[in-house]
Amino acid sequence: MEQDTTRSLSKKLQNIKDAKEAESFIKDHSKISTLHGFLNEIMAAHEISVPELIDRSGISKNYVYNILGGERANPGRDKVIAICIGLGASFSQTNRALELVKHSALYPRDERDARIAIAINQGIRRVTDVNIMLEQNGLKPLDV
């Protein structure tokens, strides 16, 4: 589900000349603008069930359902990261999810964020495993 880079999309956009091409481009490349829409798209692409997400993320059942249903529009940063880990989202997808709710992206110069990003890149899908790694390095675990 990885999207084109901004650079490749800019090159495509430079070559659009007519309205039909423009509408096609916008339809194909517009971003989902809600967190719940974005997370549901990832969940469908990865074929993950809600119970599986709840188990992997360590977040309560009601909280997960409220996020996925759009009732909780602005969950905390750690909760968004935990859901992304549980979904098997990529680093860029995790940052996009954070961006959608106006939280800061995973910051490479912050040790905790860097270790979380590395765990995501290593394919770790359970928040408990990420939290163990964080605690072993003297860092605050994800608050789920």
Image (tube, rainbow, N blue to C red):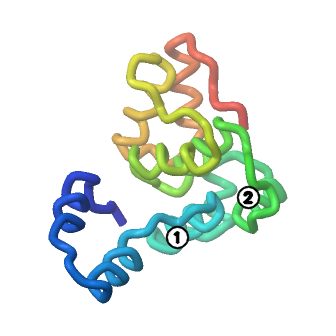
Q: Return the mark for residue 41.
A: 1
Task: Decide: few, some or many residues near mark 2? Use Cα within 10 Å; few <14, some 14-19, many ≥20.
Answer: many
Quarter of the image for residue 13 reads bottom left
Indicate whether 14 appears above or below 100: below
Indicate whether 143 appears above or below 26: above
Q: Nearer the viewer, residue 50 or 99?
A: 99
Label 1: element kind: helix
Task: Decide: few, some or many residues near mark 1? Use Cα within 10 Å; few <14, some 14-19, many ≥20.
Answer: some
Residue appearing at x 37%, y 70% in the figure: 29
Q: Return the mark for residue 70.
A: none
Coordinates of residue 142 in the picture (x, y in percent): 64, 31
Residue appearing at x 58%, y 42% in the figure: 81
Quarter of the image for residue 104 reads top right
Label 2: element kind: helix
Residue appearing at x 32%, y 76% in the figure: 25
Q: Nearer the viewer, residue 52 or 29?
A: 29
Quadrant in which the N terminus appears: bottom left
Residue position for label 2: 67
Q: Amino acid at mark 2?
A: Ile
Which residue is most to the front?
A: 18
